[in-house]
Amino acid sequence: MTKTNQQQDVKDAVRAAVKSGDDVHQQVKDITLKALTKRQLDIENIKSVTEAVIKGTNEGMTDHGKHGKEVFMQAATALDDALATAAEASALAVEEAASKVAEYSEHDFNDAIKDIQDMEGMFIDTLEKVAKDSNQVVADIIGDFIAHTRQNGTSVGEQTLIALDALKDLPKISKDIILSSTVATTSTLAQIGSGILLGIAESLKTSHSNK
C-alpha cells in the first residue's frame, strides 16, 4: 500500500469513527496506533498519520453541530495519547539498540532522539496547518485545543520528557565508529520501534477489551 493510500484509509476510518460519535477516543486511538505500526516508526510516517487523523477528525465533525468541540477533544486527545505511546516505543528502541552499540553510530542515535524531541511540535504544527484550511467554527475549536495544550501540556510532550530523561545516560558512542552500508542504521531503529509499538498497542487493546 502506498503512503497516499494509507493516508486516505486512515482519514476515512477516523472520519467514520468521529461521525459515529461512539467511543470516539478509543476508536481514534486504535486507528492511529494501527496505522503507525504499518510502516517504520520514523518522524515522516508519524507526521503522515498525524495529518490523516486530524483531517479525518475535521471532516467527521460536520455532523455534530454544537457537540463538535467535545467530539474533537476526544479525537485529538486520542491522537495525543497514541503519539505518546509512539514516543515511548521509539525510546525503548534506542535503549535496545544501545545494548548493541557497536552496530550504530552516534548520528543514528542523535537522529532517533531528535525524532522523539520533535513529536510534540509536529503534533501542534499539524493542528495549526489543518486549522488554516478549516471553516471558522472548526478553526476556533482547534485553536482552543492548541491554547489548552500550550497551557497544560500534552501527553506526547510529557512522554517525550520521560523518554529523554531515560536516554540521557546512554553509553557514549565513539566518534571513531564508521558505518558501512551493511550494518544497522536509523532505519533499523525505526523498524525496532515499530515492532515495540505493535507489542504495546496489542497490550493496550487486550487491556481495553478486558474492561
Image (cartoon, rainbow, N blue to C red):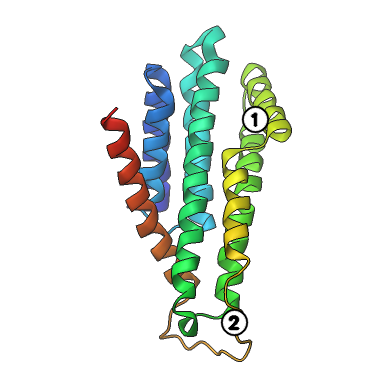
**Count of all numbered marks drawn on residues in the image:** 2
- Numbered disc 2: secondary structure: loop
In the picture, the quarter occupied by the C terminus is: top left
Residue 55 visible in the current orientation: no
Residue at 42% across, 60% down: 193
- Numbered disc 1: secondary structure: helix
Circle 1 crowding by C-alpha within 10 Å: few under 14, some 14–19, many from 20: many
Residue 153 rendering spot, x and y as whole percentages: 67, 37
> Is residue 105 placed above or below 44 in the rendered structure?
below
> Is residue 155 placed above or below 116 in the rendered structure?
above
Name the kind of residue labelled 1 in the image.
Ala
Mark 1 to mark 2 CA distance (whole Å): 42 Å
Residue 162 rendering spot, x and y as whole percentages: 59, 52
Mark number displayed over residue 36: none
The residue that disc 2 covers is 173
Does residue 203 appear left or right of residue 183 in this picture? left
Residue 92 visible in the current orientation: yes
Residue lying at the far top of the rendered structure: 66
The residue that disc 1 covers is 131
